[in-house]
Amino acid sequence: MPRLATAALAGTAIEFYDFFVYGTAAALVLGPLFFPTISPLAGTLAAFGTFGVGFVARPLGSVLFGHIGDRHGRRPVLVLSLLLTGVSTVAVGCVPTYGTIGVAAPLLLIALRFLQGLGLGGEWGGAVLLTAEHAPPERRALWSSFPQVGPALGFLLANGVVLALSASLSEAQFAQWGWRVPFWAAGVLALVGLWLRSSLAESPRFLELDDRARVPLAEVVRDHWRLVLLTAGALAIGYAVFYAVSTWSLAYGTERLGVDRSVMLVCIMAAVVVKGALTPVFALLSDRYGRRPMCLAGCGAAAVWMFPMVALLATGAPLLMFLGFLGAMLAFITMFSVIAAYLPELYEPRVRCTGAAVGYNLGGVVGGALTPIVATALAEQGGRVPWAVGAYLTAIALLSLGCFALLPETRPAPVAVAEPVSG
């Protein structure tokens, strides 16, 4: 299990690095480079629009790779999804800007972002299922949480590279070529991930299946459509919170508040470090107290904290912004530390790869794709404190709370230990 969990963690870290480095670039430089003919605000919205394309592609990737995972095994999904995401990310770093090839530049950007999302849509299901289906039931949430640490590491790696480049390059150098370096680095990381995953064993639960679904998506739509909608709605707040902190706040802090880019990156990264470190701890609590209670607690905390978070962000003070981000990340990880065990347990094994991944990534469309765009537009209409953004995030939290309330508990019952017979 340690070797398997480490390989799954490394793979998700690499693939989410690819995904997050685009979000950071969209917040900082893609607007003026690829949409220079419109206003700065419209350019930021357009850049976030291309960011959202990746989320729209993720459910399609779930269908494509979920079919492979349910028909041919979880292991091939890990290799193919990593390869697709890595190649498309490197290609983003090679796209000429609008000033060089005109309207073809943003069109190429959108196409490559779509391929990125397609690959990531398959990655989560394969990595999580391979880990969850190997893990002992009484520690399933703990072992399954390791792939969930991957996004935090990927985010830190992506923003750490950008932070180092920002500190060592001038604004002109960063805009001219520096922003491309993190995308090119994805090629090296993808090769490392492929090497780590080349020796992984197939899921024993998949190998035990005698009757595999012929068309997994058809079965999911016919028999589990309500479950898919509930899981998508339940997970929306996690995506909304994470991308409000990691993407929208970065653009808002640098453009509206005038906070230095490096200061914003450090505040966000510090909160994500705590989130990543505590993921296994919250997962252990789930193995003891259940999946659903943790998710309900996380949603409730998010609903309470969104207004304080935007108020603390609006101060522009590094420590206060960090505290706002930290509270949001703790609410987020209370839910998402257990999702890797919860979603596979909700779906039957024959359609598990498709069902769990589609539900997970549809939540990303609702919460992740729209949040940077909607929050940017809402913040533009208000004063210094973007209360409308807090209201928007709170509404999503309440929606997710209702969806989690309708889902069942799935934690395996503890195995009773027989007492010795006396006399």
Image (spheres, grey):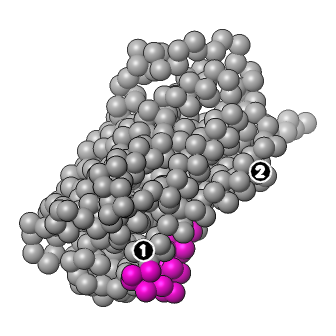
Residue that appears at 32% across and 63% down: 99
Residue that appears at 75% across and 30% down: 204
Q: Is residue 72 left or right of residue 262?
A: right
Q: Is residue 390 magenta?
A: no
The rendered magenta stretch, by its main secondary structure, is classed as helix
Asked which secondary structure carries label 1, the reply is: helix
Measured from the top left, where is residue 417 in percent x and y?
76, 39
Q: Earlier in the sequence, mark 2 or mark 1?
A: 1
Viewer-closest of 381 and 205: 381
Q: Which residues are magenta?
A: 156-173
Q: Is residue 197 above or below residue 276?
A: above
Name the amino acid, label 1: Gln
Measured from the top left, where is residue 42 in percent x and y?
18, 61
Viewer-closest of 102 and 307: 102
**Count of numbered tags:** 2
Look at mark 1 in the image and give the residue it sits on. 176
Look at mark 2 in the image and give the residue it sits on. 195
Q: Is residue 40 left or right of residue 145?
A: left
